[in-house]
Image (cartoon, grey):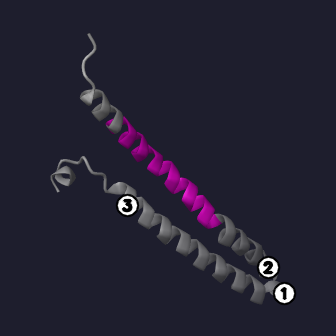
Amino acid sequence: MSDFWAFRTMVTPVIIQILFWIGAILCLITGAIMVIYGATHFQGGQGHYLWKGVLLFVLGPLGVRVYCEILIIFFRINETLTEIKHAMGQRPPEA
């Protein structure tokens, strides 16, 4: 718990993962709604919603995933640098 209060433990990667699932679910729901709306109003000139909905349904979660992975990369770099720092500190000094 002391690592948490000293900001040595990062909370943001967990929040980013939660936001990924929320974003992916929203893309799927919105894409499905657009597909249904476009299919029912296809003859009324609203058929473009059908194709936009399919694209959102397929590419939306992928785009959200890529964006979240880019954000998490910064935290992984920080973790790796911290591990290197600790490994260098445990090494005996060179003569």
Residue shown at the point (54%, 54%) measured from the top left: 67
- Highlighted range, magenta: 60-82
| Residue located beneath label 1 in the image | 43
Q: Residues within 10 Å of mark 3 (few under 14, many from 20)?
A: few
Type of amino acid at the residue the image marks with label 3: Val
| Residue located beneath label 3 in the image | 14
Residue shown at the point (31%, 56%) measured from the top left: 11
Residue 52 is situated, as x and y percent measured from the top left of the image, at 72, 71
In which quarter of the view is residue 51 placed?
bottom right
Q: Main secondary structure of the magenta part?
A: helix
* CA distance separating discs 2 and 3: 39 Å
Residue shown at the point (42%, 67%) measured from the top left: 18
State the SS at label 1.
helix
- Quadrant of the rendering where the N terminus is positioned: bottom left
Q: Residues within 10 Å of mark 1 (few under 14, many from 20)?
A: few
* CA distance separating discs 1 and 3: 45 Å
**Can you tell which of label 2 and label 3 is closer to the viewer?**
3
| Residue located beneath label 2 in the image | 47
- Indicate yes or no whether the magenta region holds residue 1: no
The relative height of residue 80 versus residue 13 in the rendered view (above or below) is above
